[in-house]
Amino acid sequence: MLTITLFPFGVGPDPNTLARIAAGTIWVSALLASMLALDRLFRADHDDGSLDLLGLSPLPLELVVLAKCLAHWLTTGLPLVVAAPVLAVLMNMNAEGFATLIGAMLIGTPVLSLIGAIGAALTVSLRRGGVLISLLVLPLYIPVLIFGVGAVDAAVYGLDAQPHLMVLGALLSAAIALCPWASAAALRLSLE
Amino acid sequence: MVIDVSARGLAAETLDCVRGERTVFTGVDFAVAPGSSLVLTGANGSGKSSLLRLLAGLLNPARGRILWDGENVAEDRAAYSARLRYVGHQNVLKPALSVTENLAFWAGLHGDPRTANRVVAAALERLGLGHLAEVPAQLLSAGQRRRLALARIAAAPAPLWLLDEPTVTLDRESVATVEALMADHCAGGGLIVVATHIGLKVPNAAVLTLGEAA
């Protein structure tokens, strides 16, 4: 959110420029916010040995991952969704885009948490995992970025945002199905 | 060593352990019957912790198999995990939570969440932590943290205990408490595999020394 407030200062107060880049900058800051919180996802549990015990408990590790993703989203994605209208005003976004922005972020930010969990799980046993997480996860974030921005821009220009939102929805369904499984597998590898 | 595959309890056949590029040990076999224990000794780095992690299922053996009541544990990992309690080097606790909250989490996970509070209180008393029940875990001393880690196995019973140097940082009185805990466990038909440097009084113990020729 802080980065968004910097943009009007950096880019200049020209309302047209700000409106043009509004959707993009809001989404990019959502990506960054999600990514910066990823390293902490499993690291504490790995470092204090909780991961061993969670792997041995009757709970499927996949469920543990899902719960962690939910917690991650509640602390990174959800606040951004709530702040999105304010940020949009800051960036002089056209009012038609607001509802779509909120909707797209509601669908898209959980995907960021889920995909991020895979990166976090793969790097949890490395000491300086942070940089590697970005490399692993950013390429996978790009589709969410493209369709998220696409949805908002479509709404702003009066086009139909539905197809973009549908794709985001599809990404979410795929992520819920695949990411916990992939993250759990990566976590089990890290236990060895 | 020929393993009787019809025997009850834990058995291991020709286990090899490779971690990274290093072969930690090869050809380990043993059998532990219900009510008895196995003490692991050996120099640092000889693979005691690795063997315990192998038995816990956190590590996969490069060769060989682990048997419970004659059946390969790899075939039903979930059931096997439910039968064991693993206490490793690390004291698993969240610093911000209280002693009771820490224990209640694991007790509720492994057992019935409804009776968790009672079970937790009893376990804390047993390990001499009753007076610290509401204290945030970050304020505990090293010995108290170790006892909290051990309280977990008192709070959530299971037949097989895998203990990695359980009495590190404990004073003599606490060591006696742990020995009593282990004696009760074996008397009830449980099994213990414990790695230790000090002379711990472990009931019905066979000794396995790692780092020598098998």
Image: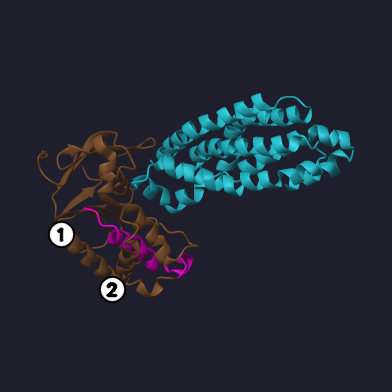
Chain colours: A cyan, B brown
Give the mark toward the camera: 1 or 2.
1
Label 2 Cα neighbours within 10 Å, binned few <14 / some 14-19 / many ≥20: few
Quadrant housing the C terminus of chain A: top left
The structure residue drawn at horizontal position 28% and vertical position 62%, both measured from the top left corner, is B154
Residue located farthest toward the bottom when viewing the structure as drawn: B131
Residue located farthest toward the right when viewing the structure as drawn: A14
Q: Which residue is mark 2?
A: B173
* Left-right relation of A184 to A101: left
Q: Is residue A143 magenta?
A: no
Q: Which residues are magenta?
A: B135-159
Label 1 Cα neighbours within 10 Å, binned few <14 / some 14-19 / many ≥20: few
Q: Which residue is mark 1?
A: B188
Residue A188 vs residue B64, the one in the foreground: A188
Residue at disc 1, secondary structure: loop
Q: Chain of mark 2?
A: B
Q: Amino acid at mark 2?
A: Glu
x and y percent of residue A129 in the render? 55, 42
The structure residue drawn at horizontal position 18% and vertical position 64%, both measured from the top left corner, is B184
Residue A164 vs residue A62, the one in the foreground: A164
